[in-house]
Image: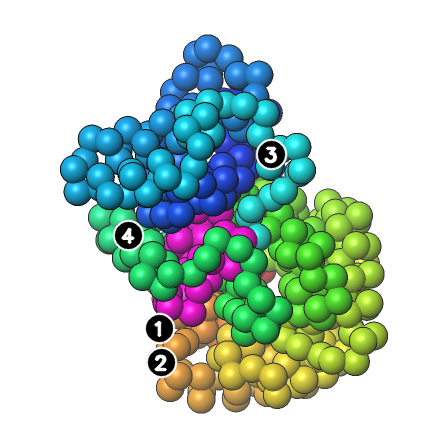
Amino acid sequence: MRSSSPGSRIEHLLRELAPRVLGSVIRRFHDFAASEDAVQEALMAAAEQWPREGLPDNPHGWLLQVAARRITDQARAESARRRREELVVSLVPPELQLVSSPDDDEMTGRDDALVLLFMCCHPALSTASAVALTLRAVGGLTTAEIARAFLVPEATMAQRISRAKQGIKASGVAFELPSVEERARRLGAVLHVLYLVFSEGYTASSGEALHRCDLSGEALRLTRLLHARLPEDGEVTGLLALMLLTDARRAARTGPSGEAIPLPEQDRSLWDAEAIAEGVALVTEALSRGSVGEYQVQAAIAAVHDEAKRAEDTDWPQILGLYDVLMRLSDNPMVALNRAVAVAMVEGAEAGLALLGPLEADPRLSEHHRLDVVRAHLLEQAGRHEDAVTYYRRAAGRTASIPERNHLLTRAARLADGGRA
């Protein structure tokens, strides 16, 4: 949950404004890399000045003015960029470069976040670069924050973002929503990036907190924007439903000390009933259209979990049937792993364990701690506690998430002591 302190409110405001300001600057100066650098400088200036001097009357205009001054000064100071300065001067009226007048974007309510989102998911970029650039340009995260989220050194992430910006520049893509045909081609990558950002926020891969609400919240906001633009697309609707139905459980996933609480042990009265109702309505609407995609099926599975009043009321046969459908739509080994859990809940733990062997040979999953977690859980269900302890400890050694590691070690210790986990 976001803090309501003045510093946090300013941070949230800056994150909200960042893509709009960046969109305005790109549209005026036609250079993604230079515009992004200038906006980052403006955001840093605001982060320093606003807490001390108070919010300006027009925060968006203030940022736009500072960014415009930065990019203009940069063009003037560097002889290598003199040609671009001349182009800028020829294309943009001087008063628009330096004066914070009533902003057209604000008057029309235009939000450039979607344009930026499709630009950052350009096919010229790898998925990793697209995620990094999306978080930087659309989400407003710093390079250090993105590096921490994805377990890479800050210098490595800075290089990745720099290459991504150069890739955008080299592609020559215009700053506008792509055509209907191009949008359809690029939509899958956009949804994939949004879901990656959400997943990292919902279950942080490293660090002391289980959640990164800034990431999951930003992914939800952008997916809502996308859904508002493409309400008839079943997969966009499915992804929004999936995020809502998953995020609805967030308050119950951690205890008072931030410890992880697994799904069967959660206090379901803490689940967000409003988000569940919205998610169920969305996925029901999407599935009624007849064209079924991966996100819709995942949302349907999440809905079955969310609609169970108690863990023992969960309709596992229905969940298994949905995983069978999902397996036909996806070759993701994580789907096969989750299906093994559903099989165990319907047919018994040994049936689920029998499905894990082939997954150990899949290089996409063989080193992932989640495979050890599932094996440990099913071994525990099968009454093979000594083996379960081994795999709980092995999983704990492989995760970089401190709450998850502590939960796994606690579970192993309780089993080793002969108590119930």
Q: Inspect the image, locate mark 3, and give the three-letter code of the amino acid beneath it.
A: Asp
Q: Which residue is mark 1?
A: 367
Q: Residues within 10 Å of mark 2 (few under 14, many from 20)?
A: few
Q: Is residue 329 visible?
A: yes
Determine whether label 1 and label 3 are within 8 Å by CB: no
Quick check: 341 left or right of 23? right
Kind of residue at disc 1: Glu
- Which residue is the site of mark 4? 162
What residue is shown with label 2? 363
> In the image, what residue type sits under mark 4?
Ser
Residue 119 inside the magenta-drawn segment: yes
Residue under the point 63% across and 75% down = 294
Q: Earlier in the sequence, mark 3 or mark 2?
A: 3
Q: Say few, some or many: other residues with alpha carbon within 10 Å of mark 4 (under 14 / 14 to 19 / 20 or more).
A: some
Q: Where are the magenta residues, as a range?
A: 115-143
Dot 2 amino acid type: Pro
Q: Estimate the spatial distance between the alpha carbons at disc 2 and disc 1, rounded to whole Å.
A: 7 Å
Q: Residue at x 26, y 35 (%)?
A: 75
Q: Is residue 220 above or below residue 63?
A: below
Q: Is residue 238 magenta?
A: no
Main SS, magenta region, reads: helix
